[in-house]
Amino acid sequence: MAWEAVQRINQPAEILAGPMLVVATIGLVVNLIGAYALWSGDSGDSNLRGALLHVVGDLLGSVGAIVAAIGIMLTGWSVLDPLLSVLVAGLVIRSAWGLVSDSIRVLLQATPKGIVADEIEAGLLNLPGIAEAGHFHAWTLTDESIVATVHVSPKEGIDPLTLPSVVASFLKEGHGIDHVTVQVDPRGALLARHA
């Protein structure tokens, strides 16, 4: 789209502004309906966000074509169409960057935004029954699914079998982590590894 628009700036062609306005208006109505349907869906789903971004790009293209058609009718300046096409392409690329970076984070199973291992380990130490916490790792499995692993040690007199459910509840409620694997180590084991 952008490359063709740049070529049309260098070699302007005759544009039939009336038919262009009619087609662009129909396109705008169809894209508004599509955007509304997609907007009401799950905003955390990358596939849905990608479809919405595509429809919004088409919608912006329709708006640009309408503005260009009206401008050409009023001024006769046919270069308005390719100029607005380049502008719309730039807006779509800018919007797509966020979707691409989020998708890359999922593909690389990167640490989710807002998850800081040291802070979570410190929070775990405030839970009843936990003497030590360490080796916390979290990654993005899907758009809305975060998984983690962590090591903890029980305080004196605490049943180690009670700790996994306590840790899992803390991580799910406080940090949105769906699945956690908790390894319970003997007291002193985590401190010995850090020494």
Image (tube, rainbow, N blue to C red):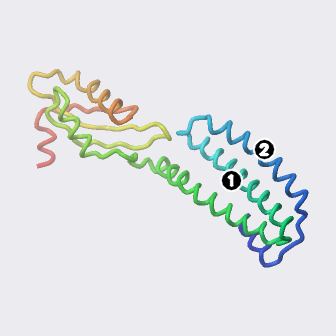
The residue shown at (53%, 39%) is 44
Q: Nearer the viewer, residue 137 or 79?
A: 79
Could you classify mark 2 by the number of other residues whose Cα lies within 10 Å: few (under 14), some (14-19), or many (20 or more)?
few
Residue 37: % across, % down: 68, 36
- Identify the secondary structure beneath mark 1: helix
The residue shown at (86%, 52%) is 23
Q: Is residue 153 above or below residue 89?
A: above
Q: Nearer the viewer, residue 130 or 73?
A: 73
Amino acid, disc 1: Gly
The residue shown at (76%, 68%) is 82
Q: Is residue 113 above or below residue 39?
A: below
For disc 2, the marked residue is 29
Residue 141: % across, % down: 46, 41
Residue 149: % across, % down: 31, 38
The furthest residue to the left = 156
Q: Is residue 181 left or right of residue 48?
A: left
Amino acid, disc 2: Val
For disc 1, the marked residue is 57
Q: Is residue 164 left or right of residue 159?
A: right
